[in-house]
Amino acid sequence: MTAPIAVSCGEPAGVGLEIIEKAWDVLKNDLSFFLIADPAHLPASVPFIEIQAPNEAAEVMPDALPVLPHPFFGKRTPGIPDPENAEGVIEAISRATDLAMTGEASAVCTLPIHKKALKDGADFPYPGHTEFLAYLGEVDRVVMMLASDQLRVVPATIHIPLKDVPAHLTPDLLRDTIRITAEGLQSQFGVAAPRLAIAGLNPHAGEGGAMGTEDADIIAPVLEEMRREGYDLSGPMPADTMFHARARAGYDAAICAYHDQALIPIKTLDFDRGVNVTLGLPFIRTSPDHGTAFDIAGQGVANPTSTIEALRMAWHMAQSA
Ligand SMILES: NC(=O)C1=CN([C@@H]2O[C@H](COP(=O)(O)OP(=O)(O)OC[C@H]3O[C@@H](n4cnc5c(N)ncnc54)[C@H](O)[C@@H]3O)[C@@H](O)[C@H]2O)C=CC1
Ligand SMILES: NCC(=O)COP(=O)(O)O
């Protein structure tokens, strides 16, 4: 039997606890998961049952949201993060990861964190889950992929300022990103022979050096080298013309130079159904593609579809592992 998915609660002031309740209601007869959270934070509307261990989740799931209790120091006020809760948010992610590493959970699904709230409240040194999970999973390099039925994108550089992107876009980073993406498509998405499109950094992919040199000097040589190793790679491609429908039919994932180059197309095409998946970890991790949405937290209007898709994807990957 597939072990349940461990869901970390994320920022209690965000929409995570609302959407996990809605996700539970949709998925309660299809798969099993448990939420690591402070029961005192759960909205009054949530029918939940506290469990003591992950293996109790499957039995509880059809009747109530299974919650593995994790006490926090602060209260929950929708829209207003309490710095006292920052430690608890981080610990919930670590606990979910530990359970996935021991096999008590089949996967980790993370609800959104507020990065600045964690930095302010707990001096969290990581810019996001992705980098923290790489540390917990003891791997040097992971890949962030955002995936939906319409598009899969990978930002090669992730949570760094735009001005630092050219210096971070090294041949080593590109090689690792291509390799991990291709392996992840094969092992986690069932794509036997992955076709990857690699975006250029500059307008028109540099246009022969007229608009920047990184495309020809850094990206193209890596692609040539890796094509000789058997990878199916196109590019460096002008990023402005690689996301329309006909272009998308030509590849299984687009590797982009930086965060917004990758995330703008997928969030424009499919904000509600995009899933954030980390490739290269020793366990499965998915997440909704959106953040804490403080502006609508507590109103009950947050759309749970991305979280539902994230849980379905994690379950499917766990069953095929
Ligand atoms: N996986 C994670 O932990 C992620 C965390 N974040 C963090 O979230 C915080 C807020 O980021 P923002 O850039 O404001 O992005 P956001 O995704 O929280 O919000 C952007 C806009 O989308 C709307 N929105 C978001 N989720 C929605 C949903 N489920 N249903 C309906 N509308 C929704 C919001 O109301 C807002 O108008 C930041 O600290 C960011 O770093 C952002 C993305 C992912
Ligand atoms: N924009 C995507 C994002 O910020 C999610 O990052 P992570 O917390 O999953 O690393």
Image (spheres, grey):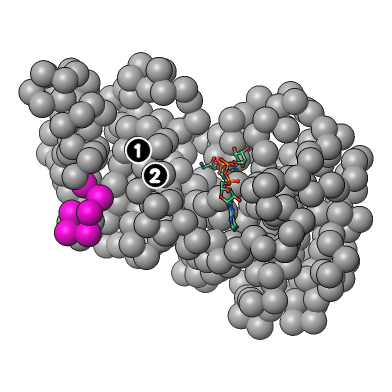
Provide the secondary structure element on which disc 2 rests.
helix
Q: Are marks 1 and 2 in contact (CB under 8 Å)?
A: yes
Residue 154 in percent (x, y) is at: 37, 43
Region in magenta: 242-247
Other residues around mark 2 within 10 Å, as few (<14) / some (14–19) / many (≥20): few
Residue 318 in percent (x, y) is at: 54, 65
Instruction: Let me know if residue 255 appears in the view.
Output: yes
Identity, as a three-letter code, of the amino acid under mark 2: Ile
Residue at (88% x, 66% y) in the render: 44
Viewer-proximal residue, 117 or 277?
A: 117
Other residues around mark 1 within 10 Å, as few (<14) / some (14–19) / many (≥20): many
Give the answer, above or below, for where 272 lies relative to 256. Answer: below
Q: Which mark is residue 261?
A: 1
- Place residue 259 in its image quadrant: top left
Residue at (11% x, 19% y) in the render: 209
Instruction: Let me know if residue 185 appears in the view.
Output: no
Residue 271 in percent (x, y) is at: 47, 56
Q: Is residue 305 left or right of residue 123?
A: left
Residue at (47% x, 22% y) in the render: 161
Q: Which residue was labeled with disc 2?
A: 264
